[in-house]
Image (tube, grey):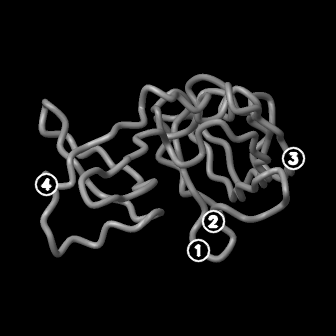
């Protein structure tokens, strides 16, 4: 096992679980392959990435991130009211349904339907976990230099 510690210039393989504060599971790699990322590559939340600096292979931690350091606060300006006529008549528009929109640059922008009436649809473009404090449970499997050709241990 490597004694390298997580920090800039490292590639990390880990298992993680994300839980809401009530203990309900949001996501986990436990039943599938572990996640691998290079520190600073943008694949992890910066607050989470910083919280695992200094850990090494074999370490396990439970880390609580407040909403500000996780997916940010819920922004009321990201909740939009749209005309019902903008949506196809046969489209399933029920609260909780995720609909993909294209922003000005044609990038995909998911929104969650909050409510529907005959003439309007309220869509929340906040990340579904915005405004929520989260617990991350991590198990570090391997830490190597980011440019290393070393095989990841699983």
Estimate the x, y position of residue 19 in percent, counting from the top left: 75, 56
Q: Using the image as rendered, state which of residue 132 and residue 6 is in the foreground.
A: 132
User: Tag 4 or tag 1, which sits nearer the N-term?
Assistant: 1
Q: Secondary structure at mark 3?
A: strand
Kindly report the distance in space between the C-alpha atoms of the residues bearing marks 4 and 3.
49 Å
Kindly report the distance in space between the C-alpha atoms of the residues bearing marks 4 and 2.
40 Å
Estimate the x, y position of residue 71 in percent, counting from the top left: 59, 35
CA neighbours of label 1 inside 10 A, class few (<14), some (14 to 19), many (20+): few
Q: Is residue 1 left or right of residue 106?
A: right
Disc marking residue 32:
1
> Residue at the spot x=79%, y=47% of the render?
135
Estimate the x, y position of residue 149 in percent, counting from the top left: 47, 46
Residue that protrudes farthest toward the front in the picture: 118
User: Tag 3 or tag 4, which sits nearer the N-term?
Assistant: 3
Label 2 sits on residue: 29
Disc marking residue 61:
3
Kindly report the distance in space between the C-alpha atoms of the residues bearing marks 2 and 1.
5 Å
Q: Is residue 60 left or right of residue 83?
A: right
> Residue at the spot x=40%, y=65% of the render?
97
User: Tag 3 or tag 1, which sits nearer the N-term?
Assistant: 1
CA neighbours of label 2 inside 10 A, class few (<14), some (14 to 19), many (20+): some
Label 4 sits on residue: 85
The quadrant the C terminus occupies is bottom right
């Amino acid at each position: 096992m490597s004694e390298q510690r997580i920090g800039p210039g490292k590639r990390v393989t880990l298992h993680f679980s994300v839980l809401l504060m009530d203990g309900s599971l949001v996501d986990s790699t436990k039943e599938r392959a572990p996640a691998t990322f290079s520190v600073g590559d943008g694949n992890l939340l910066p607050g989470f990435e910083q919280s695992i600096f200094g850990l090494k292979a074999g370490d396990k931690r439970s880390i609580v991130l407040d909403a500000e350091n996780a997916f940010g606060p819920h922004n009321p300006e990201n909740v939009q009211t749209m005309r019902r006529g903008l949506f196809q008549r046969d489209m399933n528009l029920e609260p909780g349904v995720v609909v993909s929109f294209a922003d000005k640059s044609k990038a995909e922008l998911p929104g969650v339907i909050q409510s529907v009436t005959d003439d309007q649809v309220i869509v929340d473009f906040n990340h579904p976990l915005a405004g929520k404090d989260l617990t991350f449970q991590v198990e570090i499997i391997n830490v190597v230099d980011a440019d290393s050709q070393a095989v990841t241990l699983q």
